[in-house]
Image (cartoon, coloured by chain):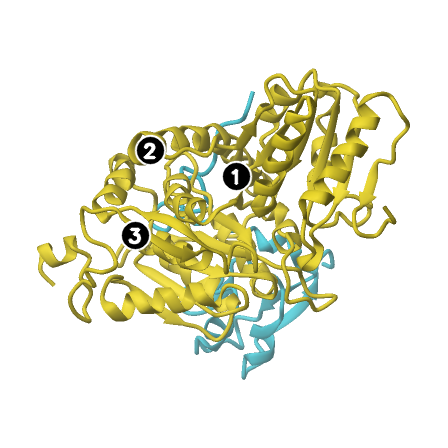
Amino acid sequence: MIKKFQFREEAGWSHADEILLCLDTGSWRVERPVLNKEKCNYCGLCALFCPTQCMVDRDDHFEPNLAFCKGCGICANECPRKAFRMRKEGDA
Amino acid sequence: MNAHARLLGCGKKGMLNMEGTEFNKTKIKVITGNSAAAHGAMLCRPEVLALYPITPQTEVVEEISGFYASGELDAEVVEVEGENSAMNIITAASAAGARAFTATSSYGLVYMYDALLQAAGYRVPIVMVNVNRETPGITAVSSGQQDMISTRDSGWIQIITSSCQEILDSIIMAYRLAEDFDIQVPVMVNYDGFYLSYLAEKVEVPCRADVDGFLAPLKDQPQRPILKPGEPMGFGTHGILEGYLELRYKHSTALERAKVKFDEIDKAFERHFGRSYGGQIDTYRTADADMVLVASGSLSGTAQKVIDLKRDQGLKIGLIRLRMFRPFPRERLIETLRGKKAIGVIDRSICFGWNSGPIYVELRALSPEIGYIPMMSFIDGIANMDVSVANIERMVRILQSASEGDSYQKVTWIGMEEE
């Protein structure tokens, strides 16, 4: 017996208004950005530079959605106030 | 452009060239294989064509440009800087719902290899003509099927034709097959470069009304998904794990469906135009034959002649002409070959690593169903070497001695061995 298909169409079409095929890229991460809220002035540069566009707007600061953040460290590199620090996954 | 002009196939550039294709009158012409391909494509009313010239396909580009200039072809014709772009353009155009066409050969085919795989993976129902020519490695501006063979696992449907008329007709059938809602797989129509590409033969050029009528059933099918402004859709999305597996599974099963579908289309074509080519395979005097030759492409005509000569001498021999190479017509080959005493396969290309012909290798995979009988590979016709009557007669002699129980050599490079 063949399992129920995930895709409605023959090819890999995804309906942007219903489902976009996303990879859980968070599982690839070696390091994760950790925010020091004290230093953040909500300028939004991290969100602009984030290649996976995973920065979530929290009204007074931005923080990464760790389900998608690949841990590339671009946010930490771009932040003028050094509000992000890259921490090795698994470390406290 | 008014509706009437569109119906008559008049383009932006002027009135229909009445010498070419009248709406409801079939024309008999003497044209080359390349010209037949261009006529076939034009009659299917492709909306986007991207073309780059390469020997021996160049004439297809020239002819299509002529149709465009005269107004017979009302389409977007894109001059590209290479074949890779050509394939990407028509893939994108097809994703947006257009009927699309391109033509290439050899170096061009391999230059678009990644795009070729994309088109198949995206399941865009495009049609491409590939004029068979030897591949890079040993630069050879000459005939051979190595280019087509090198793309056999790309997921395309591959059809091999053997006459100018069949080239034209197969392109029309190819659109019907590619665009069928149950299939949605790109189709490559192949013919031997230098032999068929430049050979002029009598060709019946169907009228537009007939081709429109033949392709009309496609309009009654459900709409395949296409990209539209204002309707966001993800196309060519990548996947991993089960998602990828599912798309591969669907693609592979669509190819399996394409086999019977192609037979049905061939029958429908016969009802419509009065010409039939047998669908997946074309058999000649195989019913009571003990020995069978399996061949494809332009050399099949010569092989047919040899079959007649040998039949006159009392030899029970027949010919299978392979028309569909991908998907491989397993069921019909088994049905035709079961119970035979010996099989010889003529290949115009090489399966490196097996030291034999590729079609031969595939046919041997059917041994459990056909029976363990002598099967021989004949490599011939490489790089414009003629597959002559004498050559095929030699193959038949080898085949006959094997069928009588003599020891035999599995692979013979005709032309490399002393006679």
What is the three-letter code of the residue carrying label 3? Leu
Within 10 Å of disc 1 (Cα), the crowding (few <14, some 14-19, many 20+) is many
Name the residue at 74% across, 59% down: A91
**Image quadrant in which you'd find residue B137:** bottom right
Q: Earlier in the sequence, mark 2 or mark 1?
A: 1
Q: In the figure, what tint was chain B given?
A: yellow
Q: Earlier in the sequence, mark 1 or mark 3?
A: 3
| Chain letter of the residue beneath label 3 in the structure image | B
Name the residue at 44% across, 73% down: B80
- Tell me which chain appears cyan: A
Is B294 drawn above or below residue A29 in the view shown? Answer: above
Within 10 Å of disc 3 (Cα), the crowding (few <14, some 14-19, many 20+) is many
In front of the other: label 1 or label 3?
3
| Chain letter of the residue beneath label 2 in the structure image | B
**Image quadrant in which you'd find residue B67:** bottom left
Give the residue pinned by disc 3: B43
Q: CA distance from mark 2 to mark 3?
A: 17 Å
Q: Where is residue A23? Give x, y as percent.
A: 55, 51
Give the residue pinned by disc 2: B274
Toward the viewer: B124 or B31?
A: B31
Whether residue B74 can be seen here: yes
| Chain letter of the residue beneath label 1 in the structure image | B
Whether residue A67 can be seen here: no
Is there one chain holding both mark 2 and mark 3? Answer: yes
Indicate the secondary structure of the residue bearing disc 1: helix
Q: Where is residue B244? Give x, y as percent.
A: 57, 43
Is A2 left, or right, of B267 in this rendering? right
Give the residue pinned by disc 1: B251
